[in-house]
Amino acid sequence: MSTSMLDGEARVLAATAAAPTAPPSALETGRRLVTADLAAVETKLAELLDSEVEAIPQVVGHLAFAAGKRFRPLVTLLAAAAVGFEDDARRTVAAVGELLHTATLLHDDVVDGGAFRRGRPAARVVFGNGLAVLSGDFCLARALEAMAALGRIEAMRTMAHMVARMAEGEVAQLALAGRFDVDVARYYAVIDRKTAALIGWCSQIAGLAEPRFRGPLETYGLELGYAFQIADDVLDFASGVGVTGKARGQDFRDGKMTLPLLLACRHDAALARSVERALSGRPPIDETVAGAVVEAVASSPALDRARAIAAEHAEKAVAALAVVPPGPARAALEDLTDYVVRRQR
């Protein structure tokens, strides 16, 4: 195993183990319930990302061990704890969920021309587009290898279906970029696939949860995914590089009509006309125009309305857990929904 990968793992574990200086967040509380499992997932990730081609762990490690929250693995492990799924497969599923997420981020930054990720230069900026794309492909291949090793046909079936949906979401988002005629239905069609599908797969433990829990856990994950992406889209207008890891308003600059922008345009005809003109021109969008649009959305009621919609999805996620036995893990899953809506980064 490469030294750089081990060093990255040690940094993440050290950060996770550090004592908080304030009351623990929902994220920290959840982590404490599955500390041993998270440590095992880190080890599994390091193993899966190791390669004799030393450029691969360097490229992937630049992102995979860059202070990520391990949100998707946490969802898997808490869901497993909540329904009493003690099979070691839970750790593999958790690691694979993070691998797939890492692959999409590596690919997304190339497609979008992203300069920052998690507050640092994106892997494509440091290593080049080619290495970033191919290292993302390596993550996908390793994920397949890990799931195949489990020998669970249902897990492979659900993963194949989910990855196909993620690909559909990414293609749909790219095809819709620069179009003003995107509506809320199309927006949801994208986020259902590109974000919620993976979280829903993680929350149902790759379809390995007991059948009576599988549907409710998947619903929990899908609703959590909607809330997560909407909150992320709000932060894109409300915050800057120091908070979100990317430039403020980057989604609009990339030609994406996200929910806050859609809501703002719906209630401000002048803004809608400005956005339509901006998107009708050849990229990149004029910086002065982009800045004015971002400020208009940020100062409009649209952000609060989008947050309220995210909160509605969070409530639906909590409701889906009604069939899950009460306990600390279920409570942690419920708390995660509030964390997702209220998070500032």
Image (cartoon, rainbow, N blue to C red):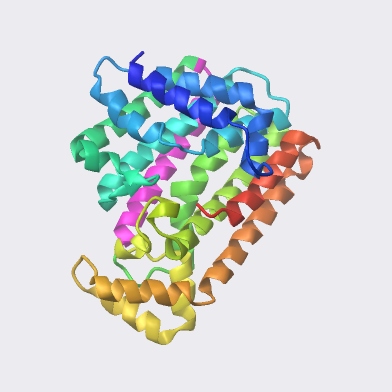
User: Where on the picture, by quarter, is residue 255?
Assistant: bottom left
Q: Is residue 147 visible?
A: no
Q: Using the image as rendered, state which of residue 267 and residue 45 is in the foreground.
A: 45
Q: Residue furthest front?
A: 21
Q: Residue furthest bottom?
A: 270
Query: Magenta stretch?
Result: 150-177
Q: Using the image as rendered, state which of residue 277 and residue 176 is in the foreground.
A: 277
Magenta segment's dominant SS is helix
Q: Is residue 279 left or right of residue 74?
A: left
Image vertical order of residue 89 relative to residue 280, above or below: above
Q: Is residue 75 visible?
A: yes
Image vertical order of residue 94 relative to residue 234, above or below: above
Q: Measuring 42% from the left and 31% from the top, which residue is drawn there?
A: 99
Counting from the top left corner in percent of width and height, residue 41 is at: 52, 23
Q: Using the image as rendered, state which of residue 342 and residue 21 is in the foreground.
A: 21
Q: How many marks?
A: 0
Q: Is residue 294 magenta?
A: no
Counting from the top left corner in percent of width and height, residue 341 is at: 60, 56
User: Where on the picture, by quarter, is residue 33?
Assistant: top right
Counting from the top left corner in percent of width and height, residue 158 is at: 51, 33
Q: Measuring 25% from the left and 51% from the top, which residue is drawn there?
A: 113
Q: Measuring 63% from the left and 46% from the top, which residue is drawn there?
A: 219
- Please identify the quadrant where the N terminus is shown: top left
User: Where on the picture, by quarter, is residue 316?
Assistant: bottom right
Q: Is residue 53 left or right of residue 10?
A: left
Q: Is residue 170 magenta?
A: yes
Q: Measuring 40% from the left and 44% from the top, which residue is drawn there?
A: 118
Image vertical order of residue 101 relative to residue 339, above or below: above
Counting from the top left corner in percent of width and height, residue 17 is at: 58, 28
